[in-house]
Image (spheres, helix red, strand yellow):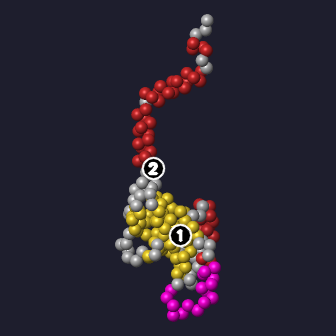
Amino acid sequence: MESLGSLTPGWVWSLLATALIAWKWKWIFKLVKWIFTRLMPPKPFDVSYEAREQASSEFGAMQGQDMRGRETTLIHFYTVDIQTHDSPITIRKVRVRTVSGEEFEAWHPGYQFLEPAEKIRIESQAIKSFYIQAPYKKEPDTVATIHVQYNGMVKVIYLLSFLARLKLALSGRH
């Protein structure tokens, strides 16, 4: 009669040995998890963005009008939405940079960032929209980056791929 060890396949014994080692040395997995969470903290927020389709036609329509004597007309051409996760954040500034290097600052709903010290607090698990507007005389190029200044840090979101940015840099357009 054959023994029990010769009836079971070899991979079963390997699996059991691996499970026993993992169970005995589970503190290593806890250490690796702790190191990973310290080196890779959770993202405090997500950024989504949308170009307004009608902005180009509005810029074109304003170019043909005589705007002398009127206050500077701003056209909303881009929207940046910020959604927080588990903790609130304080936004100091949101701006976009185009491929030509021009920068346009955001307005939060109905108001501009008027004072340099003005901050906007976004509570946890909330969404806030910021509107990017440009003067009617300055139709912006394609937006290349979004800069969000929050809690003393700046997060840069690249909208163009690395290869596209490299091609622009080599062609002389910034």
Query: Magenta stretch: residue 70 in it?
Result: yes
The nearer-to-camera label among 1 and 2 is 1
Say if 104 sits above or below 2 in the image.
below
Q: Residue at x 51, y 93 (%)?
A: 69
- Residue type marked 2: Met
Q: Position of residue 153 (x, y in %)?
A: 41, 62
> Which residue corresponds to mark 1?
79
Give how far apart the Cα atoms at labels 1 and 2 are.
29 Å
Q: Residue at x 41, y 58 (%)?
A: 124
Q: Residue at x 55, y 24 (%)?
A: 14
Residues at discs 1 and 2 in contact (Cβ within 8 Å): no
Q: Secondary structure at mark 2?
A: loop
Q: Secondary structure at mark 1?
A: strand
Q: Position of residue 19 (x, y in %)?
A: 50, 27
Q: Residue at x 40, y 77 (%)?
A: 114
Region rendered in magenta? 57-72
- Looking at the image, tell me whether mark 1 or mark 2 is earlier in sequence order: 2
> Which residue corresponds to mark 2?
40
Q: How many marks?
A: 2
Inspect this view and state whether residue 172 appears: no
- Residue type marked 1: Thr
Q: Residue furthest bottom?
A: 69
- Looking at the rendered image, the quarter that the N terminus falls into is top right
